[in-house]
Image (cartoon, rainbow, N blue to C red):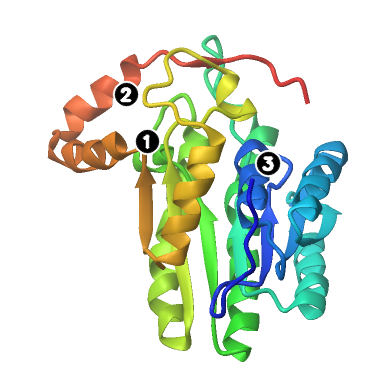
Amino acid sequence: MTSVTVAPGVSRSILITGASGGIGMELARHYAAPGRTLVLWGRNAERLAEIATRCCANGARVFTRQVDLQDGNAALTAFAQDDATHELDLVILGAGLSDIQSMDSKTEEPEKVLQLALVNYATPVSLATAAARAMMARKGGRIALIGSVAGMYELPFAASYSSSKAGLAFFAKAARLAWRQHGVSLTLIAPGFVNTAMSQRLEGPRPFLVSPRHAARVIARAVARQQAEYIFPWPFRVLNVLVRLVPQSLRERILLRLAVGQKESKR
């Protein structure tokens, strides 16, 4: 990857959560350049060290932190420390968990529902709010929340996952209205299937699958343009429009017939 010096007006201090995952690692590589500071959060220390080495080789200053977003208060404390040190002007909140109800169970496991609620919704929106407050004091900044196209559908086999992403999307819409008048832009990213460890656990088709590198590139472009929402790949944007025309009764029958499973996580 060829690095370039950061131009005036471009983000210089960037926090990426989920940086030890597929999309997060590619985002870190995408932004790594001389004159940039990257603050990378993740759960996997080995992968964090790997991506930090790559980004340093491209000229970026890199700081890593192991963070478990199930502990929201600890995450907020860590954010306050990193923001005080680096004055973050771009925050990409990409960490997330997924889970699918097993075919022979009637409900999801309550403990996993709580995990997803914390990691996919409660902690990211709290961090986004902390970032917005700090950025407003500095007269501007950019925030991106990485959701999912699953947030558009009431998936009966992944109720907690789809609802956590739906909540994230609604928060993004509301917060964007509140924050943009104070110089802070908020972009909601809603990917479809990306070829990461998370999606590789799925048993079944993964239509319109894209690579993590492609995902990072289009996410960075949407954030730079300060788009309110960016759904990709494009067939999901079309589907999002068409699904609104389907009667609710038919929509529910279709969703109930979907057969989706997942392999056990090796983490």
Residue at position x 77%, y 46% in the image: 54
Q: Is residue 58 visible?
A: yes
Q: CA distance from mark 1 to mark 2?
A: 8 Å
Q: CA distance from mark 2 to mark 3?
A: 24 Å
Give the residue at mark 2: 255
Residue at position x 75%, y 55% in the image: 40
Crowd band around label 3 with a 10 angstrom C-alpha radius: few (<14), some (14–19), many (20+)? many
Q: Secondary structure at mark 2?
A: helix
Q: Position of residue 69 (x, y in %)?
A: 73, 51
Residue at position x 81%, y 38% in the image: 47
Q: Tell me which amino acid carries mark 3.
A: Gln
* Nearest to N terminus: mark 1 or mark 2: 1
Q: Tell me which amino acid carries mark 2.
A: Leu
Query: Looking at this view, is 157 or 177 the one in front?
Result: 177
Return the mark for residue 65.
Answer: none
* Nearest to N terminus: mark 1 or mark 3: 3
Depicted 116 relative to depicted 74: above or below: above
Q: Quadrant of residue 77?
A: bottom right
Residue at the outermost top position = 104
Give the residue at mark 1: 154
Q: Position of residue 148 (x, y in %)?
A: 45, 42
Q: Quadrant of residue 16?
A: bottom right
Give the residue at mark 3: 115
Crowd band around label 1 with a 10 angstrom C-alpha radius: few (<14), some (14–19), many (20+)? some
For the C terminus, the quadrant is: top right
Q: Is residue 47 left or right of residue 177?
A: right
Depicted 46 relative to depicted 8: above or below: above
Q: Secondary structure at mark 3?
A: helix
Q: Are marks 1 and 2 in contact (CB under 8 Å)?
A: yes
